[in-house]
Amino acid sequence: MKINKEMKELVKFLSGRKDYVIFAGFGACLYTGIKCSADIDIFVPSFKSVKEIASLLKEQGWKQIKHETDNKYYSVAVLKKSKTSLDVVYSVTSKKALYSTKEKIKFNNYNLNVLSKEAMLMTKINQLTYIKRKKEKHVRDRKVINILRKEINVEKLRKLLNKLHEAFWTLGRL
């Protein structure tokens, strides 16, 4: 997979940290090879990590274009440089269930933390429920789901289902 200069910058930045796990399109691409857009989405374990990562990247020339939080269930910061973005997400579901599934994947000589295949499957199923999600993303999500469902460990999936916070089911919050 070819990535642009800003994506390379993010991969290098993330490989030096421990407090994140990649999910969404880039994470799915690492497992399936299905093309992703020029962005990276990460879960972090705390509200503090959202602020810290955003602050560090702003020092490196990234522009913060969004910060949203309810101070109870989630916090999201979106940073952008050129046409590349990074979404930094904290949520109760990610902390209690998804974050702990992280696995190491080597990409371009960097070790990256990525959601397990089981957790990636659940997040992709969740993303299919977004009413305003673009059609091309739905198509891509369905392809990822069809690949991952053949590769997952069903016992790990069952354990994960029991850990998902009610906000995952009732609010659609990852």
Image (cartoon, rainbow, N blue to C red):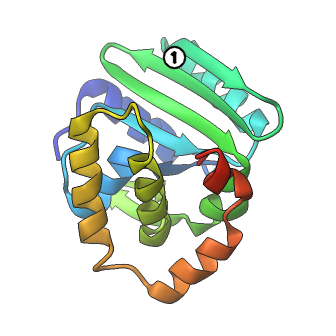
Residue at the location (59% across, 48% down)?
174
Residue at the location (68% across, 54% down)?
93
Q: Quadrant of residue 100?
A: bottom right
| Relative side of 118 to 93, left or right | left
Q: Is residue 84 above or below residue 112?
A: above
Residue at the location (31% across, 70% down)?
148
Identify which residue, 16 or 40, lies in the foreground. Answer: 40
Q: How many numbered callouts?
A: 1
Badge 1, how many Cα within 10 Å: few under 14, some, many 20+?
few
Q: Amino acid at mark 1?
A: Gln
Which x, y percent locates residue 104?
46, 65
Furthest residue toward right: 72
Q: Does the rendering let one see residue 65?
A: yes
Q: Quadrant of residue 10?
A: top left
| Relative side of 27 to 21, left or right | left
Residue hosting label 1: 60
Identify which residue, 5 or 134, lies in the foreground. Answer: 134
Residue at the location (57% across, 16% down)?
66
Identify which residue, 99 or 159, lies in the foreground. Answer: 159
Give SS at disc 1.
loop
Which x, y percent locates residue 71?
82, 31
Identify which residue, 60 or 170, lies in the foreground. Answer: 170
Q: Is residue 107 above or below residue 135?
A: below
Which x, y percent locates residue 142?
26, 56
Which x, y percent locates residue 56?
62, 23
Q: Does the rendering let one see residue 112?
A: no
Q: Is residue 47 above or below residue 172?
A: above
Q: Is residue 79 above or below residue 44?
A: above
